[in-house]
């Protein structure tokens, strides 16, 4: 075997890729400490990330970040800045697009070919964990670093992408960056998403220096691989090292607005009340009930959010917004649940004598991934001797939208107890290494493969 081929065959990622550079591992196994206030959490990052070497750099980039009336740019862009710095240290060229997606490129020997792309997201939920999304971005960077260690240049270029606002924690809906890139959303619509303080995504991206150049059309991908923690208990419970993602639960989310009238909570007659808060609450209870009706066959329904105004004692609220979502492994059942959720909004409004409007609907999931890539990942996992199984993703991911643009697949790693979107989210080195190894070999095969 030629030396170059021998090096590729035996190439492994370091025992703990990027571990010293990130907060992926605690210095001591202390339980997470809940911050004193939500403001404390949002100013400084989750308390349990602070002891790590770089503090909460990546954790603070949650949905672009919030400055809490402070003019300073940091820490809201610190995660993005650190990722860009690491990419440039690795010799990658960096470009930011018109919705803040960051692309880091490693040139190929035939550099005009479409790149093989890896990535995920760096933004987190407000009380989110340290691996969701971050693993896929930094894992992609580590693949590039590993290839540099043996001086191997792939035929096709390789790119690592950080997608903007995957979580939708600040700007609803989720997966806005990948949605805008693939044309699911228009750029103007995506930039115009508004947070609770009335600021738009476009304005905030410009403020932190990540409103990049606008493309006439998205650049072509040869293929897209997204490494991600499972965000569920199956792999961990069954002792599996790698999840072969064959698709996602067909899912539907809705943003509902209810309008009523303010009135005094004491003298105003019950039969004349138009309490928007009650309409929203009834809607969300109905959504939760849907989940229990279908739980036996794998269905899930979530009462995710309720806000109201004025939302004070002594006065009825005349406005409320609620967010609910449903998902099920069976597409037909998922569609039935979505229709039931839509009906529940109108029934809740009618019972509270309020107006109702569906402001937004988002959908994703299904059998959308490329079969040849699924089979390739499955074959590599088997050849490497990893315990693996096919699995459906139950969460939303940027890969769902990217699948509309290019052949796409996902690779899952286990996480302890399936805990996610929680400060207790945890993976060990042993949890991550098999998935990272499969990612490396799948990307290498694709990037060196024929047309």
Image: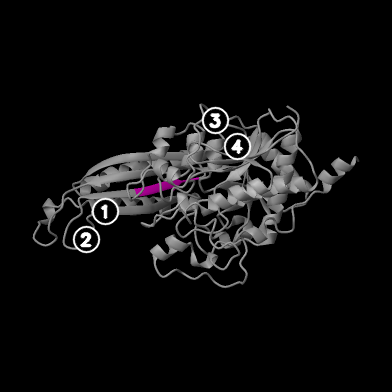
The percent coordinates of residue 136 (x first, y second) are 61, 49
Colouring mode (rainbow / by chain / secondary structure / one colour): one colour
Q: Residue 268 or 12: which is nearer the viewer?
A: 12
Residue 18 lies in quadrant: bottom right
Viewer-nearest of discs 4 and 1:
1
Residue 18 falls left or right of residue 291:
right
Determine the residue positioned at 46% across, 47% down.
Answer: 208
Separation of marks 4 and 1 at Cα, in angstroms:
39 Å
| Mark positioned earlier in the residue sequence (1 or 3) | 3
What secondary structure is marked by label 3? loop
Dot 3 crowding, Cα within 10 Å, few <14, some 14–19, many 20+ = few
**Residue name at image x 36 percent, y 39 percent:** 360
Residue 326 falls within the magenta-colored stretch: yes
**Disc 3 or 4, which lies upstream in sequence?**
3
295 inside magenta stretch: no
Residue 263 position within the rendered picture, expressed as x and y whole percent measured from the top left: 13, 55
Label count reads 4
Res 308 label: 1
Left or right of 401? Residue 148 is: right
- The tag earlier along the polypeptide, 3 or 2, is 3
Residue located beneath label 3 in the image = 218
In front: 357, or 62? 62
Q: Quadrant of residue 72?
A: bottom left
Query: Residue 312 shows which numbered tag?
Result: 2
Neighbour class for label 1 at 10 Å: few (<14), some, many (≥20)? many
Depth check, mark 3 against mark 4: the one in front is: 3
The kind of secondary structure the magenta stretch mainly shows is: strand
What is the C-alpha distance between the residues marked 1 and 2? 9 Å
């Amino acid at each position: 075997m030629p030396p170059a081929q021998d090096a590729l065959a035996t190439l492994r990622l370091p025992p703990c890729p990027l571990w010293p550079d990130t907060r992926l591992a605690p210095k001591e196994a202390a339980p997470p400490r809940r911050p004193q206030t939500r403001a404390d959490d949002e100013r400084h990052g989750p308390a349990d990330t602070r002891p790590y070497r770089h503090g909460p750099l990546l954790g603070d980039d949650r949905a672009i970040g919030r400055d809490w009336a402070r003019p300073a740019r940091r820490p809201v862009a610190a995660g993005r800045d650190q990722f860009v710095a690491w990419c440039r240290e690795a010799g990658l060229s960096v470009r930011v697009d018109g919705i803040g997606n960051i692309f880091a490129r490693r040139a190929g020997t035939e550099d005009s070919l479409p790149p093989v792309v890896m990535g995920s997201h760096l933004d987190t939920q407000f009380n989110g964990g340290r691996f969701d999304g971050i693993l896929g971005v930094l894992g992609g960077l580590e693949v590039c670093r590993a290839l540099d260690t043996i001086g191997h240049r792939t035929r096709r270029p390789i790119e690592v992408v950080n997608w903007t606002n995957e979580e939708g924690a600040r700007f609803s809906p989720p997966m806005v960056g990948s949605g805008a890139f693939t044309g699911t959303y228009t750029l103007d619509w995506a930039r115009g998403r508004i947070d609770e303080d009335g600021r738009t995504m476009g304005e905030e991206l410009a403020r932190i220096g990540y409103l990049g150049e606008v493309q006439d059309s998205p650049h072509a991908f040869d293929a897209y691989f997204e490494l991600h923690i499972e965000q569920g208990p199956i792999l961990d419970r069954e002792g599996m090292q790698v999840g072969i993602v064959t698709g996602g639960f067909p899912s539907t989310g809705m943003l509902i607005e209810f309008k009523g009238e303010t009135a005094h909570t004491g003298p105003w007659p019950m039969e004349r009340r138009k309490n928007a808060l009650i309409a929203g609450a009834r809607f969300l209870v109905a959504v939760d009930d849907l989940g229990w009706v279908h739980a036996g066959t794998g269905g899930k329904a979530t009462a995710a959010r309720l806000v109201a105004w004025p939302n004070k004692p002594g006065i009825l609220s005349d406005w409320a917004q609620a967010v609910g979502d449903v998902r099920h492994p069976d597409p037909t059942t998922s569609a039935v649940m979505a229709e039931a959720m839509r009906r529940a909004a109108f029934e809740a409004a009618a019972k509270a004598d309020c107006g109702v409007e569906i402001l937004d609907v988002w959908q994703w999931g299904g059998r959308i991934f490329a079969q040849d890539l699924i089979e390739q990942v499955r074959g590599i996992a088997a050849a490497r001797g990893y315990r693996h199984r096919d699995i459906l993703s139950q969460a939303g991911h940027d890969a769902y939208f990217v699948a509309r643009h290019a052949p796409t697949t996902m690779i899952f790693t286990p996480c302890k107890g399936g805990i996610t979107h929680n400060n207790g989210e945890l993976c060990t080195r042993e949890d991550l290494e098999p998935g990272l190894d499969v990612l490396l070999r799948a990307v290498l095969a694709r990037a060196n493969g024929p047309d």
